[in-house]
Amino acid sequence: MQNNNSKNIQEIINHLKVSGFVYQNSEIYGGLVNTWDYGDLAVNMMTAIKKYWVREFIKKEKNFQIDSKIIMNPSVWRASGHTDNFSDFLIENKINQKRYRADHIVKDLFPEINVEKATFEELEKIIVDRVKEYDNAKCDWGTIRPFNLMFKTQLGAIDSATSTTYLRPETAQGIFLNFKNVCRTSRAKLPFGIGQIGKSFRNEITPRDFIFRTREFEQMELEFFCKENEADKFYHYWIEKCVNFVKMLGLNSENIRIRPHEKEELSHYSKGTSDIEYLFPFGWGELLGIANRGNYDLSQHMKFSQESLEYLNEDGSKIIPYVIEPSIGLDRLLFALLIDAYHVEKLADDDLRTLLKLDYNIAPNQLAIFPLTKKLADKAKEIYENILINSDIRVVYDESGSIGKRYRRQDALGTPFAITIDFDTLENNIVTIRNRDTMQQEKININEIETYLNKFEK
Ligand code: GAP
């Protein structure tokens, strides 16, 4: 069994590109730096992951969902603190005019230094004094400066400072703005949560590591509102829930750890944050975060809007609720699941088999249907179309190449089961079903296919 440190990230990325999980964005124009489009296979996986998020974070918890806008009134970002505080530290190599995130340079070259604790003056000193060559170039460093990560845009036809607004850097603020609306229309009583899934945008100085850090990404965020004296309890509840969620999707426990933030690295709004990190082949990296945001956001929006966002207790007293926020990046989660699932196995004949050991529930396709020869295509297509139209099973059909090659192709795409229709099927309705991981085969009746597969549903 391969562990993650021995997995070759470039080999995995190539596999995802070649097999159609991910395409280069704007490819015919030479691409756009670290920007990727998702193909059918990845879209299927993300749809399945979102479905489970809705079940676990919304339905089972009796929470609510909203869908707020990417572009909001610019005052939102002044109130939330993003206009003033949402920055990374940038430093430029004056020789080639390339700009980098200062903490990334230090992390890359001096892994023994805890960049989360370093001040920007310390980062600058380390880089200027000690980094004479970086990214295959000689260096002459400029001064370090904060760079705001929000994407600016203009509203309407007027091009002036008053028409400037931003693409949202997190979905969370749309939830805070609708807190009062949801209270009023749903009559929800504390504690309860409001979640949303949607795109967020950050003008990352150095988007990198494939889909780990991009400028456009999708978040699944829940803002869970509660009374102050229950905030700590729910903070721990949601940490555990998040760990269980990623394990349920199939992530190997050995590659997951919980990392509480140190005081120095807490965001401006946070009373406590824990990241759930995943062991990527390039090192531990944040997969998702759970934050106790206190009542910072609602208080700030009350101050800036002059509107009350207070919650009315049953005894008539008013409070500003505390908020626990589990925030999951879908793209990163997808990447981690694919890395975890990627295996290259040596078979008895020394042949190599590439396979994605994805959990049945999130696999891009769950079943492949093959006729043994093209002469059996009619029967095989009949079975395929029946499953495609009459069930929720994600199914594909393939009749090209030898059966062995077709199995391998589906193994490499993560399809957990493949069914072969042979000449006997025409007589007795019996097909052969093969398991991707064990390569074991069984005979089952066509009528049993759905029941057979439904056993694997979570
Ligand atoms: N509302 C809180 C919030 O946005 P965050 O830690 O900045 O917190 C939450 O982001 C999650 O969003 C991260 O754990 C990560 O999974 C994902 N994320 C953040 N920036 C990203 C980027 N540039 N590319 C891909 N995913 C990103």
Image (cartoon, rainbow, N blue to C red):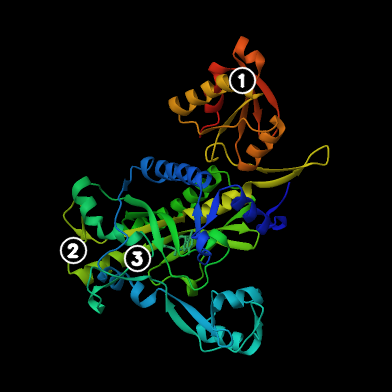
Mark 3 closeness class: few <14, some 14–19, many ≥20 residues within 10 Å: many
Q: Residue at x 28, y 50 (%)?
A: 190
- Label 1, label 3: how many angstroms apart (C-alpha)? 53 Å
Q: Mark number for residue 167?
A: 3
Point out residue 90 in the picture as x, y percentages from the top left corner: 50, 80
Identity of the amino acid at label 3? Answer: Leu
Question: Which mark lies nearer to you, 2 or 3?
Answer: 3
The residue beneath circle 1 is 376
Report whether residue 275 is seen. no
Which element carries disc 3, helix, strand or loop? loop
Quick one: label 1 or label 2, which is nearer the N terminus? 2
Relative to the observer, which residue lies in front, 90 or 326? 90
- Label 2, label 3: how many angstroms apart (C-alpha)? 25 Å
Identity of the amino acid at label 1? Answer: Leu
Relative to the observer, which residue lies in front, 163 or 125? 163
Which element carries disc 2, helix, strand or loop? loop
Relative to the observer, which residue lies in front, 48 or 293? 48
Q: Quadrant of residue 165?
A: bottom left
- Label 1, label 2: how many angstroms apart (C-alpha)? 69 Å
Point out residue 417 in the picture as x, y percentages from the top left corner: 61, 31
Which element carries disc 1, helix, strand or loop? helix
Quick one: label 2 or label 3, which is nearer the N terminus? 3
Relative to the observer, which residue lies in front, 203 or 121? 203
Tell me if 226 is positioned left or right of 183 in this view: right
The residue beneath circle 2 is 308
Identity of the amino acid at label 2? Answer: Ser
